[in-house]
Image (cartoon, rainbow, N blue to C red):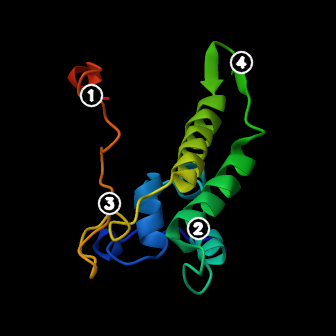
Amino acid sequence: MATYTYDPAQISLFNKHRMRFELGDTQIDGGKDTCALCDEEYDALLGEGIGADGWRAAKIRCLEAIVARFAMAVDFSAGGASFSLSQRYDRWNGMLITEKKRRQMITANPHALGEGCEDGGHNFWLGQQNNPRSGFERFGR
């Protein structure tokens, strides 16, 4: 039997409650009709912990499972009522694409840029290649 729980007091921990919060899967009153995944599925995808690949990878695994579940949802209408079930797929797939892009982003190590280095810093700094005469500073580039 599938269970659906959400405890907002636990979102500071890396667990299924935080994952539900970050994914917006917090409407548990309707059970399988309103939730993307049940507690057991979140537990299986999160495993014993977030693992070596981190929270973002666990979030991507959850989103992939949700997208796979909603991939077969189609729009239909009958007797004057219409249902746009593909909107759920579009929403979750958009979140999956965004998370995958975030995971691929390059982040700078502040110590490599000279902040807090024992050798007093390096001979480069953030923005050293910006050209003040280019005029792009006005546009936020």
Disc 3: CA contacts within 10 A as few (<14), some (14-19) or many (>=20) = few
Q: CA distance from mark 3 to mark 1?
A: 25 Å
Q: Of label 3 and label 2, which has the lower sequence position?
A: 2
Q: Of label 3 and label 1, which has the lower sequence position?
A: 3
In the visual, does 37 lie left or right of 17?
Answer: right
Viewer-nearest of discs 1 and 2 = 1
Viewer-nearest of discs 2 and 4 = 2
Q: CA distance from mark 4 to mark 3?
A: 69 Å
Name the residue at 61% across, 33% down: 90
In the visual, does 137 lie left or right of 14?
Answer: left
The residue carrying mark 2 is 58
Amino acid identity at mark 3: Asn
> Dividing the image into 4 quarters, which one contains the N terminus?
bottom right
* Badge number at residue 78: 4
Q: Of label 1 and label 2, which has the lower sequence position?
A: 2
The residue carrying mark 1 is 140
The residue carrying mark 3 is 123
In the picture, residue 97 is in which quadrant?
top right
